Amino acid sequence: MRMRRVIAASVRRGTVAFLLLTLAATEPALAAGVSVTSTDMPGRRGVLIASAGIPLDAPWKVSVYQLARSKFLHPAWGWQHSERDYLMAVRLARGDGMHVDTDVLFAAAFLHDMAEFMPCGGPTMEHGECAARQAGEILRGTGFPMQKLAAVQAAERGHMYYSRAGSDPNAIVLHDADSLDFLGVIGAARLIALTGEKAPSFASAVKELRGFLKDIPPRLITRTGRHIGVERAAELQSFLDKLQAESFDGRAM
């Protein structure tokens, strides 16, 4: 609670110097007609832009982004993963001609893995369920339109590749976006990073990545996601084949 109040107060004061202030030209389709003034740079009008180019076009988005940047630090499911999920979800929605709510997508993308940093309900609770239970407390008081909370919670609960996304377009595109982030070179980087410097090898990550190649592509829902999934699965397969060869058929991995 205290952290949320501090973040909200910092947003009102405009103390967001660590964010890049730039014009919305990088994402005109997403930021059209939006203008946010930063008191850190008097006289400049534009849109606060997140690291990967996401417009922070409402004060509550700045609040959530600050929370993620300061607290959700991890090579596999930190704030960078959230940015990738959001941008991919928007791409999938456009590719399939699906109508989505970018408020719902933003909140769900940045908070869906927060249980890794803010646990609740014990170790047996699925982390998407934990995120759904905590989302209201995080978003309340930031200016987020709380009538959209249920849609955020549904997307958080259904985001994993093994979860049921349901019928809501926001949940469907987040599910596929999160699933795709386990494939390709980015998926390999995430899983190998999890082994850590104290692990005897990264063979366990390789085994899990091979499992992803079998389990994830058939579970992709969107047409655009399935197309990207084919590309990323081939990319990951190529990487693993080369890794197998360069580790002397896996004997020195």
Image (spheres, rainbow, N blue to C red):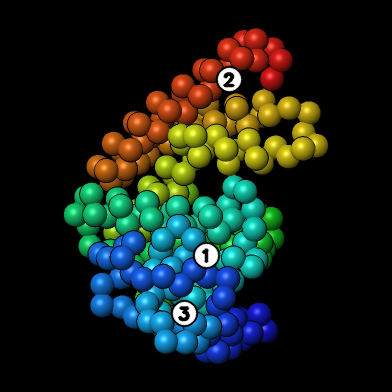
The secondary structure type at the circle numbered 3 is helix
Depth check, mark 3 against mark 1: the one in front is: 3
- SS state under label 2: helix
Mark 2 and mark 1 residues within 8 Å of each other at the beta carbon: no
Residue at image coords 53%, 17%: 242
Which mark is drawn over residue 111? 1
Residue 243 circle label = 2
Q: Position of residue 67 (x, y in %)?
A: 59, 71
Q: Residues within 10 Å of mark 2 (few under 14, many from 20)?
A: some
Query: Label 3 neighbourhood size at 10 Å, few (<14), some (14-19), many (20+)?
Result: many
- For marks 2 and 3, the one nearer the N-term is 3
The residue drawn where x is 61% and y is 14% is: 246
Please provide percent x and percent y for residue 52.
45, 57
Residue located beneath label 3 in the image: 60
Q: Looking at the picture, which amino acid does disc 2 mark?
A: Leu
Please state which of residues 226 and 8 is positioned toward the viewer in this rendering.
8
Q: Quadrant of residue 192?
A: top right
- In the rendered structure, the answer to whether residue 156 lies left or right of residue 207 reads left
Residue 45, horizontal then vertical, whole percent: 37, 82
Point out the residue furthest to the front here.
43
